[in-house]
Amino acid sequence: MSSTTDPRGHARPVNGAALADHAHDRSDRVEANARLTAMVGVVLLVLFTAEVVTVILGAKQVLSAHAAIGYLLIPVVLLKMASTSWRMIRYYRRDADYRRHGSPTLFLRVLGPVLMALTLVLLVSGVVTYIGPSWAHPTALLTHQTSFYLWLAALASHVIAHFLETFRLTARDFLPRRGRIASGPWWRRSGVVAGLAAGVALALILSGHASTYLAQYHHHR
């Protein structure tokens, strides 16, 4: 039997079961974070695919849809960045459970921040292009178009590396028999739904400026 201390500094015995429960709770939060990251990743994969389809069709031809999906992406992307950044911070602060869980390969540790930066550049330049001041339009449009190809290459590498793990972790929340239950599935789902709802609100408010954008586009062309 081991012991711990109470707030007054007195020794207090702790049996093996209590230690096991404490270790399980700490491990559980790592699993919960991984599942949230995976769940958001699945949603982003669907939205990114839809956005790429609008590019293939010709963004100017389906501009309202292209802009709406872009706005819908913003809160979900921020949620994904928050969950992955939390894991990274805990790992580099030497949290024992996150360290025990391990880290990705060096390539993926470099790719993650690169993809995050490119995603931010792509979204911000898209917003500025679409609703920013007219003087910023040419630079923002060039940045948006150029960063898209770099972002797409980074995204493809990221998806290939994490595809199976992402769907496996997501399935554990929706198909409990595929793995142990991790605490907080309702909160994870609610967080994703809230991100999507915020994105829908942004899309409804800001995506209806296609004619203004096209007028600016042709003026600067």
Image (cartoon, rainbow, N blue to C red):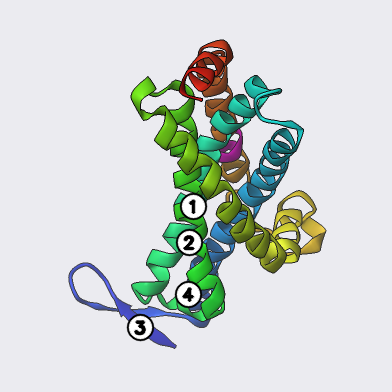
Mark sitting on residue 118: 1
Q: Which mark is residue 3?
A: 3
User: Tag 2: residue type?
Assistant: Val
Q: Amino acid at mark 4?
A: Asp
Instruction: Determine which of the numbered discs, if any, sits on residue 6 in the image.
Output: none
- Residue 32 appears in which quarter of the rendering? bottom right
Q: Nearer the viewer, mark 2 or mark 3?
A: 2
Residue drawn at the location 51% of the way across and 25% of the way down: 221
Question: Which residue does the numbered mark 2 point to in the structure image?
Answer: 114
> Is 193 within the magenta?
yes
First along the sequence among labels 2 and 4: 4
* Dot placed on the residue nearer the N-terminal end, 4 or 1: 4
At which x and y percent is residue 142? Answer: 48, 40
Three-letter code for the amino acid on which mark 1 is drawn: Leu
Residue 82 is situated, as x and y percent measured from the top left of the image, at 45, 50
Is there CB contact under 8 Å for labels 1 and 2?
yes
Tell me the CA gap for discs 3 and 4.
21 Å
Q: Position of residue 3 (x, y in %)?
A: 35, 83
State which tag comes first along the sequence, 3 or 1: 3
What segment carries the magenta color? 190-194
Q: Amino acid at mark 3?
A: Ser
- Find the distance from the CA under tag 4 to the CA under tag 1: 30 Å
Q: CA distance from mark 1 to mark 2?
A: 6 Å
Outermost residue toward the front in this view = 221
Q: Which quadrant would the N terminus be assigned to in this image?
A: bottom left
- Specify few, some or many for label 1: CA neighbours under 10 Å numbering under 14, 14-19, or 20 or more: many
User: Local crowd at mark 2 within 10 Å, few (<14), some, or many (≥20)?
Assistant: some
Of residues 38 and 141, the one drawn nearer to the viewer in this rendering: 141
Asked if the residue under mark 1 is in contact with the one under mark 4, i.e. CB atoms within 8 Å, the reply is no
Name the residue tied to disc 4.
97
Where is residue 190, by image quadrant?
top right
